[in-house]
Amino acid sequence: MTRMIQCISPVDGRVYAERPALPPDAAQAAVARAQAAQAGWAARPLDERIACVKSGVAVLNTMKERAVEELAWQMGRPTRYGGEFGGVNERTDYMSGIAAEALAPQVIEDSNRFRRLLAREPVGVVFIVAPWNYPYLTAINTIVPALIAGNSVVLKHASQTLLVGERLAEAFHQGGVPEDVFQNVVLDHQTTEALIGARSFGFVNFTGSVGGGQAIERAAAGTFTATALELGGKDPGLVCADADLAAAIDGLMDGAMYNAGQCCCGIERIYVHERHYDAFVEGAVAWVEKLTLGNPFDAETTLGPMANARFARTVREQVAEAVAAGAKPLIDPARFPADDGGAYLAPQVLVDVDHSLRVMREESFGPVVGIMKVRDEDEAIGLMNDSPYGLTASIWTADPERAERIGARLQTGTVFQNRCDYLDPALCWTGCKDTGRGAALSTLGYHSVTRPKSYHLKKVTQ
């Protein structure tokens, strides 16, 4: 019996979209087509591949109105924010612009005796398992460099954002990328793991939970398939004694609450120097109380439902446990009457918290943040590092040298000063500890979807 993969809309709880999961034989056939098509795609000039990719993204931009509406239905983001197209365009343009240099061979010697060089060639078929929280952006991070480098791409999107993969495939095909070179597939977990275990892919990129990453690693065990895994996060913010307080409040609270807190690099815990603690907490509460929780299609809504009622349930449980243990909630849920006990969840700010609480240690991925007072940099760094995760850290200070000094001691993939919750395509997107491994964007993003190949060519026989 064919299994149906469903997207349950957080807006009203109905089945918004459903698609049949590919049976194993059909999934294997799709991979075989991708493998067969890859060599011809790689043989096309780099400029042609870049042109097709950019054309595909241009087509995607023409779908903006439709895509924004679909995103609201699928994962609850308010339509007022307009989707993810600014970031999609920025990342595509940057990765296209550096492709020639990033993929060019490194010539070690070219003399009358030897030509020695280090080249990069595509890994073959790149498999992307994409998440629902930023479904276009996270997929584009790997789709663009993978296609430009000459790989075929097989995309499996999250069930919560089933339609995103279809839109991406539609756009890239119209842009000139052959249908077998870019394929969107609907798979269940068992078939996904079986394909990985069968060495179907040259590279697997997964963004999702720690448990999901562990399942990918188990499936790939013994196959020597390269993987990149961006998993959980519990990203910290630090407000130093010399911080611009107003800017820190606005930046960190937006980083904590935007997209209903469902951001890989969202701010989930904040440490504030004792000089600013009281004022920061007061400002944070005032900032959150200005939010409007409601239907994502309403123009005044700034905070939509979480993508699934079970995600909201996890946040409610963390908050309830913290309050029972002595934490103080500063936001009255009555200010957010749209909170229905399901996917619509009132935001929360907690104080009197410590690292014994789940809400300060485990990923929340929702509109809640805990705030703690710190005496100095050493205490702050110890707390920021006291986490199984390491994706980004945000430092608010007027002193760049201080930011670098603190950042050098943090166990994280990216250090921000006076900003947060942003991906710079010129910089490597990476994590450490249970957040995972691998590199996306920047020149290193091309290294992930290619392999090195050495040429040692002796021009003489003596």
Image: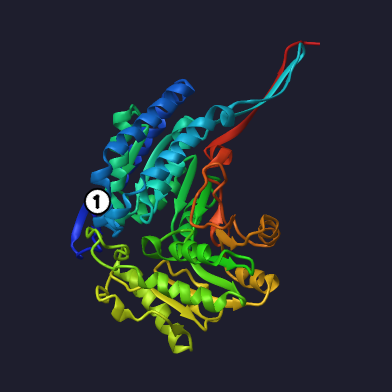
Using a 10 Å C-alpha cutoff, classify the residue at mark 1 as few (fewer than 14 neighbours), some (14 to 19) or many (20 or more): many
**Residue at x 46% of width, y 34% of height:** 93
Q: Viewer-proximal residue, 276 or 453?
A: 276
Quadrant of the frame with the N terminus: bottom left
Q: Viewer-proximal residue, 367 or 282?
A: 282
Residue 7 visible here = yes
67 above or below 266? above
Q: Which amino acid does label 1 sit on?
A: Glu
Q: Viewer-proximal residue, 462 or 389?
A: 389
- Where residue 304 sits in the image (x, y, percent)? 30, 63
**Residue at x 59% of width, y 26% of height:** 104
- Where residue 87 sits in the image (x, y, percent)? 42, 45
Disc tally is: 1
Quadrant of the frame with the C terminus: top right
58 above or below 324? above
- Where residue 32 sits in the image (x, y, percent)? 37, 35
Dot 1: element: helix
Residue 22 visible here = no
Q: Is residue 23 left or right of residue 318?
A: left
349 above or below 201? below
**Residue at x 31% of width, y 37% of height:** 60
- Where residue 254 sits in the image (x, y, percent)? 43, 62
* Scheme of colours in the image: rainbow
Image quadrant in which you'd find residue 314: bottom left
Name the residue carrying label 1: 70
145 above or below 435? above
